Image: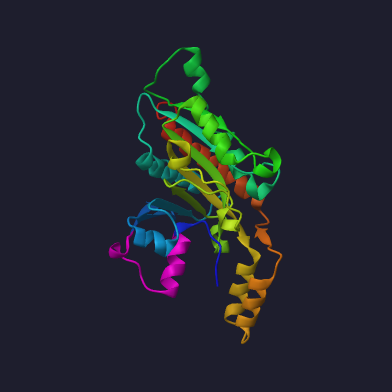
Amino acid sequence: MKYRTDLAVESKELFERENHTLEDKDGIVTEEIDYGEGIKAVRIRITSPAGEFKLEKPMGNYITIEADGIIEEEEGVREKAEHALAEELKRLIKFHYNLKVLVAGLGNSEVTPDALGPAAASKVKVTRHLFILFEADGDDEMSNVSCIVPGVTATTGMETADIIRKAAELTAPEVIIVIDSLAARDIRRVSTTIQITDTGISPGAGMGNTRTGINSQTTGAQVIAIGVPTVIDASTIIRDALADNMENAWEIDDYLDNYETQMIVTSTDIDMIIREFSDIIAGGINKTLHPGIYS
């Protein structure tokens, strides 16, 4: 059976479940970092074509931040998750005097599970106009940051990658940060997980609706993608529920594989998930790009 997921950590778990434990020699390097108070980061680095084949993802870095208690509003958890996100971003984006960054909030703001990108982008501190106003080449405290919310192809008639590429031609960023909603295989990750990767993103890939990729090849800049799983394939939940309880589970599996209508589900508290995680993502980005303003 084929599970849908955008998360590298889940791809690794699925491969290990069906095959064997992955090691450095397989082109997969894994490291775990404990930030305390239930916050941890799992860093997965794909280092070879063999690793690409096993996880079905391009070579590069994939960082998964796992934080329980955000939606429950446990004291200090949101701030700790924001700190962890900023620390992981700083490993991928080195602040300097002339740093220029374009932030792109992907998704549809009218559809709540897909609204993470626009919501987070609206909270990022934009500064490019200040650099233009004061004719400044750079700054010791903040980056030259521009922002775009390109919408989705169904409402714009244009490929999101094409819009971002044109915006990049105008702003000449060194780094493009794209923020998007993701799909998970495990429902428990819908309200606990943030993924960061330096390999870019293919909008809609987790749901089988892949658009033109947004990466260094298509944009001419380093692309950092940040995402939170907000949806899961309904058939995944059904398969998990039946796997250990039905003698004819494989018949059910065949039915789901051949069922033409695909159903995607989300959490009942998706509004809160979008609000909380967009705050965390924007906060982490602001701390990374504007270290003299956000400490």
Q: Quadrant of residue 191 in the image?
A: bottom right
Is residue 75 in sight in this rendering?
no
Residue 257: x %, y % from top left = 63, 72
Q: Judge whether 148 appears above or below 272 on screen.
A: above
Q: Per the image, is 20 magenta?
A: yes
Could you tell me what secondary structure mostly forms the magenta stretch? helix
User: Along the line of sight, which residue is nearer the eye, 113 or 11?
Assistant: 11
Task: Determine whether 286 is above or below 274 in the image.
Answer: above
Q: Which residue is rendered at x = 45% and y = 30% of the image?
A: 173
Q: x%, y% of residue 281? A: 51, 41
Nearest the viewer among 64 and 166 is: 166
Residue 68 position in % (x across, y down): 50, 56
Pick the quarter of the image with the C terminus. Answer: top left
Where does residue 184 sit, x and y in percent of width and height?
55, 59
Q: Is residue 271 left or right of residue 281?
A: right
Q: Does the magenta stretch include residue 139?
A: no
Which residues lie in the magenta part? Answer: 9-28
Q: Residue at x 52, y 56 (%)?
A: 6
Q: How many labels does the image show?
A: 0
Q: Which residue sits at x=39%, y=21%?
A: 139
Q: Nearer the viewer, residue 94 or 77?
A: 94
- From the viewer's perspective, is residue 251 above or below residue 139? below
Picture quadrant where residue 30 is located? bottom left
- Residue most extreme to the bottom: 247
